[in-house]
Image (cartoon, rainbow, N blue to C red):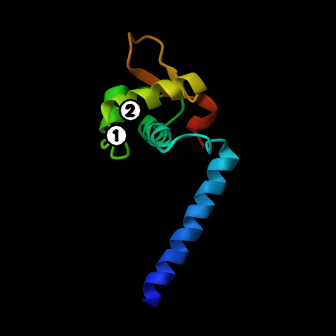
Amino acid sequence: MNKSLGKLSVLFELRSMLREMEHEVGLDTLTSMEMDVFLAAHALSGSAGEVVSSDEIRKHDLTAGIAQASYHRALRSLLTLGLLEKAEGYKSKHYLVRDDLAGS
């Protein structure tokens, strides 16, 4: 039982640090789905200016379990917030993580 309590304490500390970091970066107002879509796009983009497709984001482990309608709402929200941008030179479904956040 003590071992479980120790793990819960560590989990609590990690969760607290994560929330603090999200606040510092300005991502604390995102819903959990928006956060997962954004983090998946960031992970897939690799570097600033690298285009990522909607299909790639959708298939990422963080987003695979999100219902399609919810996924698209989160994606639209991230575009509206300016965290993702539509990539130039593509008809649709290709995005960039905002330059100032891509390397962070």
Q: Secondary structure at mark 2?
A: helix
Q: Secondary structure at mark 1?
A: loop
In-front residue for pair 25/103: 25
Q: Which residue is mark 2?
A: 71
The amino acid beneath tag 1 is: Ile
Residue 102 spot, x, y in % from top left: 56, 36
Q: Is residue 26 above or below residue 50?
A: below
Q: Give how far apart the Cα atoms at labels 2 and 1 are.
A: 6 Å
* Labelled pair 2, 1 in contact (Cβ < 8 Å): yes
Residue 27 spot, x, y in % from top left: 61, 42
Residue 54 spot, x, y in % from top left: 36, 27
Residue 37 appears in view: yes
The residue that appears at 61% across and 63% down in the rendered structure is 16
Q: Which residue is mark 1?
A: 66
Using residue 100 as the reference point, say whether residue 62 is left or right of it: left
The residue that appears at 47% across and 24% down in the rendered structure is 76
> Which residue is at the far bottom?
2
Occupied quadrant, residue 70: top left
The residue that appears at 42% across and 89% down in the rendered structure is 1
> Which residue is at the far right?
24
The amino acid beneath tag 2 is: Tyr
Residue 31 spot, x, y in % from top left: 52, 41
Residue 49 appears in view: no
